[in-house]
Amino acid sequence: MTQTTTEPAALGIDLGGTKIALALVDTGGRVLAQRRLDTEADAGPEAALDAMIAQARELIAEGRAPVAAVGVGAAGQVDRLRGILRSSPNLPRWRDVPLGRRLSDALGRPVAITNDGSAIALAEQAHGAGRGHDDVVVLFVGTGVGGGVIGGGRLLDGAHGYGGEIGHTTLVADGRPCSCRNRGCLEAYVGGWAIAERAREAAGRWREAGERLLRAAGEAEGGGAFGRITAATVGRAAGAGDPLARELVDETGRLLGHGLVSLIHAFNPRRVVVGGGVIDGMTELLSIAERVAREHVMEVFLDDLEIVPAALGAEAGVVGAARLAIRTEAA
Ligand SMILES: [Zn+2]
């Protein structure tokens, strides 16, 4: 990528549990240049912040576009007003990190911060599968389940910015333990880690039916195959016609569909955008979920509702972070 422009751009930063992505993004959502580095969660926030700032300075110095503002989508609970990452399930050493102040001091530009799911939601609504609509729910099903809600064209993230944790809405009262402190969350059933757990349990319970799943997880390599069953294993085995894996995909799709019913009733979206690695790895999942959602949602909500796959892929995080920066600057 060697584009150069005089149009102002924003620097978007996607701070994840394993990777940090930085990109120079123009107002049309196009990535002009980008960098990636490992988060190295064990090294703690200071080392990662230093590395992040160094990469950001290089991107700005390259001069492909004047950088008006910086946006961050961070994998955790972000105090939007104070610019502080309060906590992060995947980055246990990051507690109350003043990301906003550190970045604005180092880069000399205004910095806006949000949760990574909210960043993806902003990106999909502005430049992806939600484009052209002001009321969009974006659900991202990866290892965890995140997303965000755009209502009336605005990100609905609550009093402090913690809102939009739609993966942690309760699907089953006192259900399966979640990665948060609740039980029975949507994530605790359809998140990649939860699908893997449910698959291991099923393979243990129905040993004969679970044989193919175990083989797909590499039992041939000897021992411990239960621990190697992942959501991806389930998706592959289902694709190959394994009945137990297909049953797991069907059950996951139905659970996801019931989760969508709550979101549709709560927010009356025009479009529901669903993406993430789990969706990509299980081809039938979204169509099963959509069928269940359409069966259970109040009819008036169905008038012009569309449930569509996400469009932006892995770049959504940085594009959304940049979008947040541009919007905050313009506000
Ligand atoms: Zn939860």
Image (cartoon, rainbow, N blue to C red):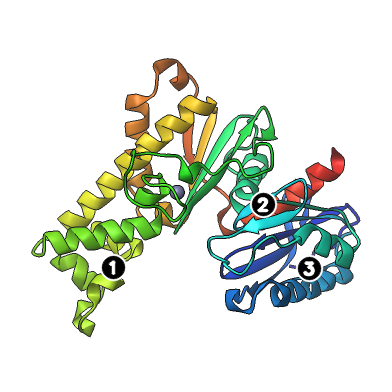
Residue 38 drawn at (x, y percent): 62, 75
Whether residue 24 is visible to the viewer of this picture, yes or no, is: no
Q: Nearer the viewer, mark 2 or mark 1?
A: 2
Circle 2 sits in a helix, a strand or a loop, which is it? strand
Residue denoted by label 2: 78
Classify 10 Å Cα crowding around label 1: few (below 14), some (14-19), many (20 and above).
Answer: many
Mark 3 and mark 1: Cα distance apart in space? 42 Å
Query: Which callout, 2 or 1, points at the residue further toward the start of the chain?
Result: 2
Residue at screen point 32% across, 56% down: 195
Classify 10 Å Cα crowding around label 2: few (below 14), some (14-19), many (20 and above).
Answer: many
Q: Is mark 3 within 8 Å of ligand 1?
A: no
For residue 298, what is the image quadrant? top left
Residue denoted by label 3: 2
Query: Is 35 on the left or on the right of 244, as rendered?
Result: right
Q: Amino acid at mark 1?
A: Ile
Q: Quadrant of the C terminus?
A: top right
Query: Which callout, 2 or 3, points at the residue further toward the start of the chain?
Result: 3
Circle 1 sits in a helix, a strand or a loop, which is it? loop
Evaluate if marks 2 and 3 touch, with contact meaning CB atoms under 8 Å apart: no
Q: Is mark 1 within 8 Å of ligand 1?
A: no
Q: Is residue 51 above or below residue 22?
A: below
Residue denoted by label 1: 229
Residue 205 drawn at (x, y percent): 13, 60
Q: Amino acid at mark 3?
A: Thr
Query: Is 180 on the left or on the right of 91, as rendered?
Result: left
Furthest toward the bottom, the residue is 222
Q: Amino acid at mark 2?
A: Val
Toward the viewer: 29 or 198?
198
Query: Is 167 on the left or on the right of 42, as rendered?
Result: left
Residue at screen point 62% across, 45% down: 162
Circle 3 sits in a helix, a strand or a loop, which is it? loop
Q: Nearer the viewer, mark 2 or mark 3?
A: 2
